Image (cartoon, coloured by chain):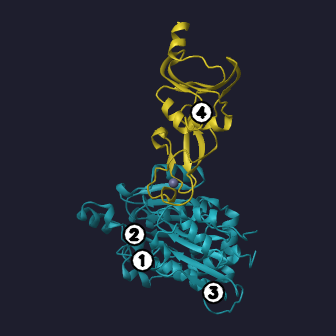
Amino acid sequence: MGEEKELRVRRIKNGTVIDHITAGQALNVIKILGLPDASEGVVSILLNSPGEHGKKDVVKIENRELKVTEVDRIALIAPNATINIIRNFNVSQKKKVHIPEFMEGVIRCINPNCISNSNEPITSKFNVTVDDDRPKLRCTYCGRVISENIAKHLL
Amino acid sequence: MIFKDHHIISMTSFSKDMIDHILETAEKMEPIALGKQKSDLLSGKVLAVLFFEPSTRTRMSFETAMYRLGGDVLNLGSVDASSIAKGETLADTIRVVDSYADAIVLRHPREGAAFLASEFSTVPILNAGDGAGHHPTQTLLDLYTIKRQSHLDGLKIALAGDLKYGRTVHSLCYALSLYGAQITMISPPELRMPEEIINDLENRGAKVTEVESIEEAIGDVDVLYMTRIQKERFPDPAEYQKVANRLKITTDLLKDAKQELRIMHPLPRVNEIHPDVDDTVHACYFKQAFYGVPVRMALVALVLGAIE
Ligand SMILES: [Zn+2]
């Protein structure tokens, strides 16, 4: 089994492994993190990988250690994701993602008449609250709330 | 209480104390608004009035407020003739105009425009309506009307008409919840106030009842707040007529009302209030329109720091 996994995606020597991504969200995670543009190293994606709690996605980024602040943004679509910083094949740090209270420039407001959806020189802004474990984004400009299908509204 | 340099964007940022302070200041402005007393409180100050969609009354009300206090007004003029038609962003317009004026009144068709303006402006922004968003000066003048013509504490108010889409009604209800008002909602089922807002109001201390006709509420309330029902909300014109006829106030209906009942309407009205009602003691919608002036005088003077 272990060998089989090795063949699917190789271990990385240095970099970041984002594990336990909600199955199906890996490509959105890549998008939110601005990869691969944000990193020169190899980025590998594993979709629908069998995990202890059902299927999950995994993203491995070689030779780049992501900062917690940049990774927390993915909590909106992958709330159970864990961040593993790998140094010399070992996990040197392991962290859970946390939903940030404020979010800038990741999501588009669902109100077509919102000023943030016009050609103004601004990025979208949301105040984030968590209701029953589900994130709720309130547009700082127009007040409209997004609570469902957040991944559909990525910029 | 310090209001100097504050933006007036939405009612949600006001505490009850802040509202009370604005209304008390407005009361002091009333003799000046009536032209009985002269003032040069804002002499040398310039108010820019940027209306990206027409709303003549609101604009005139702000302009007269500024003139009555001895200040000057810069008007953007018609939108077509200005740089907006050339595709300039609101952010750029604000960054230019804030160097000409001490405060900016903004009306804009998009929600969130006033907040955006406040991010770019070095002078206070007064939101005079942003799309279906906020219109705080309307709410404050409604509250002022209730204070002057009735009472805010222990108020029983009925709101009739389009309670689903009417932003002024939502904003007024939120403010009234700060005063623990008893609110009766009168609307056809298709224009009911959204459940989420009713829950919010109750959580904030208001008591809410819902009925479908004015008759059911008129006997008990201190204020009846009428609003327009827009034809566009009804695909079937016959259905619109039916609803519009049911939510119409006539002198006949007023027989059951208390002597102290006051009827309000943000104007312009269509058929919601029969002209015969104008001559009764209950009518106070024209007074309400006037009250916009002292309220806006108070706001402009407060944000400019001319008074505290
Ligand atoms: Zn928005």
The answer to whether mark 1 and mark 2 are in CB contact below 8 A is yes
Q: Are marks 1 and 2 on the same chain?
A: yes
> Label 1 CB, ligand 1: below 8 Å?
no
At x 49%, y 60%, the residue is A119
Location of residue A78 in the rendering, given as x and y in whole percent from the top left corner: 55, 31
| Residues packed near mark 3 inside 10 Å, few (<14), some (14 to 19) or many (20 plus) | some
Task: Give the labeled residue for mark 4.
Answer: A40
Task: Give the labeled residue for mark 1.
Answer: B268
Is disc 4 placed on a helix, strand or loop? loop
| Chain B shade | cyan
**If you read the primary sequence from the N terminus, does the residue marked by circle 1 or circle 2 appear first?**
2
Q: Are marks 1 and 4 on the same chain?
A: no
At x 65%, y 19%, the residue is A13
Task: Give the labeled residue for mark 2.
Answer: B228
- Residue B227 sits in quarter: bottom left
Residue A53 relative to residue B230: left or right: right
Mark yes or no: residue B91 visible: yes
